[in-house]
Image (cartoon, helix red, strand yellow):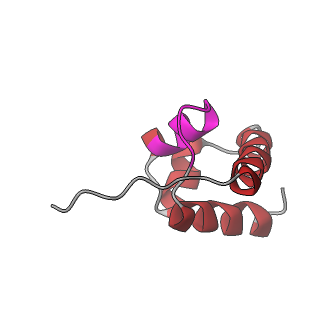
Amino acid sequence: MAKKEKHEFTQDEIQKQKELRDLYKQTLEKGTQQYIAKMTGISAPVLSNFKNEKINLYPHLFVKLEAYLKSSGS
């Protein structure tokens, strides 16, 4: 399995990650992490690490979570 290259985040991307993280936390008050993981195809452990500010999402995962959260009416 090929190792993924480390993504360097710009300040703008870091700010967008923070905003999405806040939206995700608000949405978790209404639903479960397992459900969101199932709907987005992002593993629950990755979502948990994102929520707890241990990681930032790779761009393709960011897009998936953002699309789900914005379409779910959060």
Task: Answer above or below: position of 33 versus 66.
Answer: above
Report the magenta residues as a range. Answer: 46-56
47 falls in the magenta region = yes
Pick whichever, 7 or 58, lies toward us: 7
> Which x, y percent locates residue 68?
67, 65
Pick whichever, 74 or 18, lies toward us: 18
Point out the residue furthest to the left here: 1
> Which x, y percent locates residue 9?
60, 52
Report the number of discs: 0
Task: Answer above or below: position of 71 versus 30.
Answer: below
| For residue 21, side relative to residue 46 (left or right) | right
Task: Answer above or below: position of 36 versus 72.
Answer: above
Q: Residue at x 32, y 58 (%)?
A: 4
> Which x, y percent locates residue 66?
69, 63
> Which x, y percent locates residue 22?
78, 42
Which quarter of the rendering shows the N terminus? bottom left
Q: Residue at x 78, y 65 (%)?
A: 70
28 falls in the magenta region = no
Res 50 quadrant in image: top right
Res 40 quadrant in image: bottom right
Pick whichever, 48 or 6, lies toward us: 6
Which quarter of the rendering shows the C terminus? bottom right
